[in-house]
């Protein structure tokens, strides 16, 4: 087997009567022995032997929870395999068939996945840091001696219709890959090379693409709600019909990107002149229980830097709005829809946010000192309460000193470097949230749910 020069997409060849000879289906008992010897090899124990499973049919076998780091699976079929919680660090998975495989929480750090097929695979929470998923073509000699592709090998790494929610692919090489209609919700894609990659109609909601190279990439029809593309390269990127509402585009040049028919937040001109009328109509709507007036609807609007201090916007619709650096000091936003909003640097000191929906909002650097994020009482007779929802919210470097967060939904929040001194977090749901370098001095966490919390140090 040889590989082509580095300047061209990697290609491997295999003699049909050698490495590519007729495949015999492996059985679980045989593979268990191979895995046991490989794990002994990794621990430098007597009898250890590196696993070399090149071109083997390993389909539907169970590798879950085992350590196969540094193993060689070149050209193997792992179709439908269970690889959950498996370590495959530094593995050679060149041109492997991983279609429909279960690879959740699997570690592929620095693995060679060039030309691998991952169609329909379940890759949620998997680690692909620094992995190579570029082109790779496996070939063999045909009947007439000519080189032909092995069955099902296209040359491109293919993730079509796969699910990779929360997967970490930081610094991976994914140029020329097919990632169409893939679910990359909340995936970490920092500094990934997506040059000429096909990401059309992919769901990138909440994904982090800081520093990613998307030169000549196809993101037509992609959904990027709340995605972070700061410092990414969008040279000749196809963003036709893409949904860019709530995208963070700091230090990004869109001048060479194709944004034809893309959905982008629109700046409302002369908002200051009409704000009094908008608020008055909304107040009338509240007072009449919706019979008169008009509910505030600033959804998908760019209202960054505006002054809403002290205003009553309760139950208003501000979802997907750009509200960077807005002044909302002492504003009433109880039961308001603030999902997917970009409120970086906003001042919400002492604001009333009881029962508000802040799911997937970006509040990095925002001030919420003394803000009320406790439940909203919906019925005094039945004691029905509606908690504030901050699931998947970004609160890095946010000031939450003295904030009332009782019973708030804060699952999977990013509270890195957040100031939570004196905050009331009683019975709050903080499962899976990140507390790296957060300041929790004096915070009340009685009854709080903290299962799976990261770097939590009370």
Image (tube, rainbow, N blue to C red):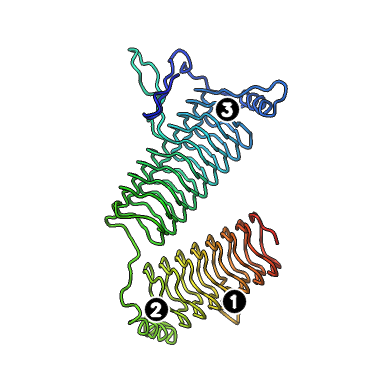
Residue 295 circle label = 2
Which residue is disc 1 drawn over? Answer: 370
Q: Are marks 2 and 1 in contact (CB under 8 Å)?
A: no
Binning the other alpha carbons within 10 Å of mark 1 as few (below 14), some (14 to 19) or many (20 upward) gives: many
Residue 77 seen in the current view = yes
Binning the other alpha carbons within 10 Å of mark 3 as few (below 14), some (14 to 19) or many (20 upward) gives: many
From this viewpoint, which residue is outermost toward the front?
A: 251
Q: Position of residue 308 (x, y in %)?
A: 44, 79
Residue 153 seen in the current view = no
State how far apart marks 1 and 3 are (Cα): 54 Å
From this viewpoint, which residue is outermost toward the right?
A: 46
> Looking at this view, is 324 or 67 the one in front?
324
Residue at horizontal 36 percent and vertical 43 percent from the top: 198
Secondary structure at numbered mark 2? loop
Secondary structure at numbered mark 3? loop
Circle nearer the N terminus (2, 1): 2
Secondary structure at numbered mark 1? loop
């Amino acid at each position: 087997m040889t590989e082509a020069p580095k300047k061209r997409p990697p290609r491997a060849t295999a003699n049909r009567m050698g490495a590519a000879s007729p495949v015999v289906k492996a059985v679980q008992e045989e593979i268990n022995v191979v895995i046991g010897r490989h794990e002994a090899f990794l621990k430098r124990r007597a009898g250890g032997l590196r696993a070399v499973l090149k071109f083997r049919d390993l389909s539907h076998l169970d590798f879950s929870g085992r350590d196969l780091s540094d193993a060689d699976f070149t050209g193997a079929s792992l179709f439908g395999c269970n690889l959950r919680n498996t370590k495959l660090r530094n593995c050679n998975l060149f041109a492997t068939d991983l279609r429909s495989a279960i690879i959740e929480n699997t570690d592929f750090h620095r693995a060679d996945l060039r030309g691998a097929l991952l169609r329909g695979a379940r890759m949620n929470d998997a680690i692909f840091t620094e992995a190579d998923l570029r082109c790779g073509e496996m070939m063999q000699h045909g009947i007439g001696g000519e080189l032909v592709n092995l069955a099902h090998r296209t040359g491109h790494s293919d993730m079509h219709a796969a699910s990779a929610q929360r997967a970490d692919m930081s610094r991976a090489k994914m140029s020329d890959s097919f990632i169409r209609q893939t679910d990359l919700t909340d995936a970490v894609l920092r500094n990934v090379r997506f040059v000429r990659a096909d990401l059309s109609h992919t769901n990138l909601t909440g994904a982090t693409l800081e520093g990613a190279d998307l030169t000549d990439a196809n993101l037509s029809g992609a959904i990027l709600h709340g995605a972070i593309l700061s410092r990414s390269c969008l040279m000749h990127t196809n963003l036709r019909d893409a949904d860019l509402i709530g995208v963070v585009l700091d230090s990004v040049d869109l001048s060479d990107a194709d944004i034809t028919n893309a959905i982008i937040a629109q700046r409302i001109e002369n908002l200051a002149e009409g704000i009094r009328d908008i608020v008055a109509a909304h107040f009338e709507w509240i007072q009449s229980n919706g019979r008169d007036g008009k509910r505030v609807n600033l959804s998908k609007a760019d209202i960054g830097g505006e002054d809403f201090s002290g205003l009553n916007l309760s139950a208003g619709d501000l979802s997907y709005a750009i509200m960077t650096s807005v002044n909302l000091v002492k504003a009433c936003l109880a039961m308001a829809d603030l999902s997917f909003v970009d409120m970086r640097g906003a001042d919400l000191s002492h604001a009333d946010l009881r029962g508000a929906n802040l799911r997937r909002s970006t509040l990095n650097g925002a001030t919420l000192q003394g803000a009320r994020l406790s439940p909203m009482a919906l019925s005094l007779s039945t004691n029905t309460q509606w908690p504030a929802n901050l699931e998947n919210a970004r609160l890095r470097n946010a000031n939450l000193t003295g904030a009332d967060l009782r019973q708030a939904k804060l699952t999977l929040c990013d509270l890195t470097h957040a100031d939570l001194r004196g905050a009331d977090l009683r019975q709050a749901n903080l499962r899976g949230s990140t507390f790296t370098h957060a300041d929790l001095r004096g915070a009340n966490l009685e009854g709080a749910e903290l299962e799976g919390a990261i770097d939590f140090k009370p």
